[in-house]
Image: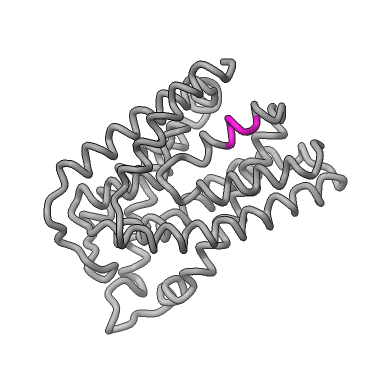
Amino acid sequence: MAPWYVAVILGLVEGLTEFLPVSSTGHLILAGHALNFTGAKAETFDIAIQLGAILAVAVLYRERFFGLLRTDPLRRFSGTRGLWLLFLTTLPALILGFFAHGFIKRHLFGPHSVALALGVGALLILVVEMRRRRPRVYGLDELTPGLALGVGLFQCLALWPGFSRAGATIMGGMFLGAERKVAAQYSFLAAVPVMCAAVGYDLLKSWRLFTAEDVVFLAIGFVISFVSAWAAVKTFIALLSRCTLKPFAWYRLVLAPLVWWFWPA
């Protein structure tokens, strides 16, 4: 396996970018090329450390997740209704991802594809922000099945590495009438089931690549990913009370041509 500091760097990259609209997968691909950590084992490591980021959100929003175990008359996003909303959001990406998994792995996991996805996603963020109307949904308990399904359809865009799952779902929520902060919070909650399914599917296929000697390397990446994702989510939610998503779009537009020119295909 690579030196321990590679696990630290990639864990930071994963945790800091997973729930921001900048694409964690894209950044991990780029960081892997910069650190000369590529190949099937590296790709599986990138997937494994996503579990740390997922756990961070599950812990931060544990009250909401525990609320899904029973219906709370004071909260509409609870019990079977909350589970139904998350199911509607998760289903489109699961279906499309199942059928397109091989194509994505073969053709879209490369720096040039990532650069294009970064640019396209940035432009869509700017369009959504500029054409934004007055929100209709100001809380998670106001989410409707139609909005949940619409966010799920937007989430399919994230199957293109570099586009950003968080960016796709937050844009989708805002476009469909959710207030920016609510769209982000629902994006975090909706990430858990779809990421667990995707990560679990990939790890079942690839876990044999790792040996007992790799456990420490994996543990370092997992812990760093958890801690940095925790900090990133809390900071991002605080920022959304004062700013738009436009700075993230401009960052992506600056990064995209640099990726295109300076990383080999």
Q: In the rendered view, would you say 230 is above or below 209? A: below
Residue 101 relative to residue 156: left or right = right
Where's residue 21, x and y in %? 40, 44
Residue at 54% in and 36% down? 27
Which residues are the magenta region? 28-32
Is the C terminus in the top left, top right, bottom left or bottom right quadrant? top right
Indicate whether residue 5 is drawn in magenta. no
Where's residue 84, x and y in %? 33, 63
Q: In the rendered view, would you say 47 is above or below 118? A: below
Residue at 59% in and 49% down? 50
Nearer-the-camera pick, 244 or 73 = 244
| Residue furthest left as drawn | 134
Residue 202 relative to residue 193: left or right = right
Nearer-the-camera pick, 247 or 44 = 247
Where's residue 187, x and y in %? 38, 55
Residue at 42% in and 57% down? 236
- The main secondary structure of the magenta stretch is helix
Where's residue 203, x and y in %? 65, 44
Residue 234 relative to residue 178: left or right = right
Which quadrant of the structure image shows residue 71?
Answer: bottom left
Residue at 50% in and 48% down? 18
Which quadrant of the structure image shows residue 118?
Answer: top left
